[in-house]
Structure formats: C-alpha cells, structure tokens
Image (cartoon, rainbow, N blue to C red):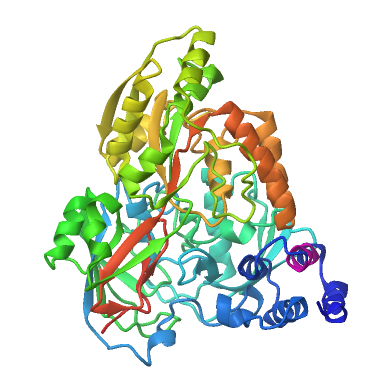
Amino acid sequence: MDYSRLDRVRKSATPLELDLVESYARGRITRRQFIKRAMVIGLSVPTVSAVIAACGPGAASPAATAGGSASTAPAASGSAEASASSAASGGSIKVALQRPAAALDPIAMQDLGAYGMLATSFEFLATLEPSGLDIAPGLAESWTPNADGSVWTFKLRPNVKWQKDGKPFTADDVVATMGRLVEAGNSGLKGVIDEKSTKAVDPTTVEFSLLGPNGNFPYLVSVFNAQTVITPVDYASGTTLDQMPDGTGAWKLDSYDQATGAKFSRNPDWWGGKTPLDSIEYVWFDATGPMVTAYQGGQVDAIVQFDILSGEPLLTDANTDVIATRAATHRQIWMRTDTGQFKDKRVRQALALTFDREAMIQQLFKGKADLGNDHVIAPIYAYFDPSVPQRKRDIAKAKALLAEAGTPNVKAVLHAGQVLEIADLAVLIQSNAKEAGFDLDVAVESLDTFYGAQWCPAEPKDPPCSGAAELGIVDYGHRATPDVYLNSALKTKGVWNSSQYSSPAFDAAFKEFQAAVGVEQQRAACTKIETVLLEDTPIGVPYFYNYFSGSSKKYKGLYSSALGQMFFSAASQV
C-alpha cells in the first residue's frame, strides 16, 4: 500500500469520493465494484488509476476496464465511430421482440416490448455500456454530485439534433421531460425530484436539486429507468412514438404496425456518426417458442430475449452468439396486504414457505439463476447481505402459520401474464402450495390485458394499483441498482405497488439507502430492507434469473440490456 499516494487523493476528495476510496483501500469492495461506482459519482480516470496503483501493483487501467468515467467520457458506448474501422457497411437486421402490450408512450409504458421500441429512437442521459450491466455517458457527457449527493450537475452532449425538425437538443428538453415524469409519478423518480428540482443552467448544463441526498441518481435517469428517455420540449404527455416519430438516436421510425412489427432506418444526422447498418426491422411475437423457431428457420437474425426452456438449442448452436447476463431480473408474486385473505402476514409467509426454489431454478432455468429470498436486493448487487437467513421450503411451518391465522385452507386465483416462463412458474406455485392447504386456480392472460386488469389497473388512481388482484405474478427486468423496485413496488403509495404494502420501517430503510453516500452505508441499509421484507413478505421472489439474448454470427457489435432493449448503433454484418 502506497500511503503517501493514497493520502494525496484523500486530501482532495469529497465525502462521497472518500467513502468509496476507503471502501476499496480496506478491501470491502472489489476493483470492479470500485471502478463501477467511481464512474457513477464522476471520479476522474487519473484519480481512479492513482487509487488502484496505491492499493496494489499490477492493477489494470480503469479506462480499459470500464470504458472511461463519467467525468472524462469517451465517445458513448456503441457509437458508430467505435466500430467503423472493422464494420461492413450497409444491410439490415431482423429482430424478434416481445409484442408491445400497449401504446408506445414513453412516460406510461410498462412492458419490455415498448421499452425496446422507444430506446431505438430516443436516448437517455446515461446509456448502456456494452457489458449490458452498467451505465455509460449518453446524451450527458458527464455528471458530478456535490459533497452529499443532493445536487447533481449533468453536462450535455453538444451538436445533437432532433430527428423530426433538426432543432438542437438542449437542457430545456431535459427539464421538460423531467417535468412530465414528475407529473406522472415515475417509478424511479417519485419522491426523488419534484417539479422545481430540474434547472437549465445553460443550453448544455442541467442541474438537479434533489429532495434529499441520493448516491444512485445517475441510474434513475438512465437506460435502467426505461421511461426516462429524453423527449422534445413540446412532446406532451400522452404522445406516442408511432403518432409522432422523433428522437435523437441512431434510428428513425419509418413504420409501425401493432399486428406485425416496426421498421427503422439510419438517422443520417446522428451525433454518433454513420451506423454500419442501414436499417432494423422488428418482428412481434407473443411467446419465445415461436421466436426461436423463426430464428432457427432464418426468418429473423436476432432475439432480444429468450428463455432457457425454449432457447436451449441456441446455447450450443455454432452459428449463434448468445449473450448470457447474470442479472437482477426476477418475478414478484404480489399478495395484497391491505385486504382479503393475504392481509395477515402469516398467510403471506406461509405461501412463501411452500416455494421449492431450487426445483424452480432447475426446472425453469436449468440452474441458470440465483436463489431469491422474497426481497429485491439481488445477489449481484455489491450491497447484498448474504447473512440474512435464506427462507427454505417448510410445509409443516406453512401449515402451522395458516392454522394460527385461522385460515387452514386458502382458495384464491393466481393471476399471471403470458410471457417467458411465468405460466410454468404459476403451475409450480400452485402445486407447491397445495401441500400446505392453498387451493390456487391459475389464470394466465395476455400482457395487454393482464397489466391493466390484474396488476395495476388505472382506476382507482389513489393509491396507485389499489384495484389490483389479491394475488399475481408480474415480471421485472434488470436494474443496475434496486431503486426502481424499492420505490415503485414496495414504498408506500409506490406507482407499481400492487400488494398495497405500507411499512414505516421499510420506508425508513429505503430512505436511508437512497441517502447513503457509499457502498458500506448502502449495505447497512440493505440489511434492514432485506430483513423487513423477509418478515413482512408483501411479495415472494423465488429467484433472479439469467437473461439470454442472441444473434446470428453474421452480425457483430450488437448488445442488450436485461430490460428488453437491444442496441444496434455499432452493429454490422460480418
């Protein structure tokens, strides 16, 4: 340890930066976790290099490991310029995508199909790095917090134009977008900013004055909060991409058909340069089995997401590049905590105790998933606390809890959307729970019906989702931090809180997590969150599954998030 070199960094560091440096120097986080967090809080590449060098010999350059940092941003991840030297020019790609469940409304969209569509034309302040698991500079070239993380300043990329009219992208567009998101109660930003929080300092600088310190704020205006795509200042709430094609991204929407698919062509004025491909065509599917069949028959060239049961042959296909991402993607089995049969937490705990989690992972994912423990702090997060006891299957205890609650036999409908493995999961839950005295009828519906009728009906509006069914399974895509899950599904009056969960202990722990300035403080808050949710059990989370996408080896340079988005700006034919 080179203490003199480390001390030079310590003397000039803010509290937010110092906490990170100390966590790394004391071995509490890995080098990868250090570099990842450094990028988020805007620590410069020279400073990161100095810390790594001071803490041990032979450390790799952070620029090589993480693709640069937010404060010294390179060209955005996946830019056409990055691959132009080796790319074959021209051509198109056909992509299989889950059919969007509703209108292509950037503010109100809820499904992965819509997420993928909107991210093709519109862009985020922080985009996706090619690894698919973290953020990188997008429409913002850099971002820096103040000492306690309560004010964040974003420097915007210059010379960016809107597709529709060629007008310049400016800070006013960001302010207007954030205003619309606040009005809608966005899943990640509700309670983090209000209508007065966002200010245009100048045309290329935006300042966010948060309602309280937040160490993860860049993630909340990134690809991992899918509704935060930046739209033009005059893009009124309720406007959809198909009604008013626009964006700052590499691709322009040419046509959209709710029944069949959509076509995009190259945006010649994109700030990232000329894309190698000329166009993209999305083809809709309602299930992954037909997607895989279409891919194997040469009807499509790529699949945004497939499940392991339908797509297992692709894993060993010599002509397919498979992207397998260990992620926080999961299913939430929500149970109404305010009314009905699951109001008593003993009933909720009893149902969770029937889950044969290991068998689910083997049967549904061939082992390619992590155990869940009925909370949303996934094992991939640096602040996950493995010391919180893992809930295990215990039918005797489940029966005892039901007896204590005075409900030895519970009859209910388990609602589910038709996507990936969820219908099979519903049948497994039904079978598992029967042994303890639950009589569950499984009702599977198309997503365009399920989201609005069972999971989160539009009415009643206050509190959100108060018209939800008493029991159901809903899909959640990957987020690089758990803020969206915690804020939307579990916080009191969260916009996706279908369980109607309300806990002062949870809300306080979540607030503590939001305000945490470093990994150690975040981990301490997450220990409380995990413990409270395990005890209250407003949701069941049996697993966090690996996300699979794939493409023909005739193409290279495409990459995907585990949130339904695939990025093609650097993609080319081989």
Q: Is residue 21 magenta?
A: yes
The image position of residue 467, as x and y in percent, is 43, 25
The image position of residue 494, as x and y in percent, is 55, 37
Relative height, residue 317 to residue 490 (above, below): below
Q: Which residues are magenta?
A: 18-25
- Determine if residue 257 is in view: no
Relative height, residue 158 to residue 214 (above, below): below
Main secondary-structure element of the magenta-colored stretch = helix
Q: Is residue 528 magenta?
A: no
- Determine if residue 43 is in view: yes
Relative height, residue 540 to residue 433 (above, below): below
Position of the N terminus, as image quadrant, is: bottom right
Q: Nearer the viewer, residue 311 or 120?
A: 311
The image position of residue 101, as x and y in percent, is 30, 46
Judge from the rendering whether residue 2 lies leftward or rightward of residue 551; answer left or right. right
Judge from the rendering whether residue 397 lies leftward or rightward of residue 366; answer left or right. right
Q: Residue furthest left?
A: 297
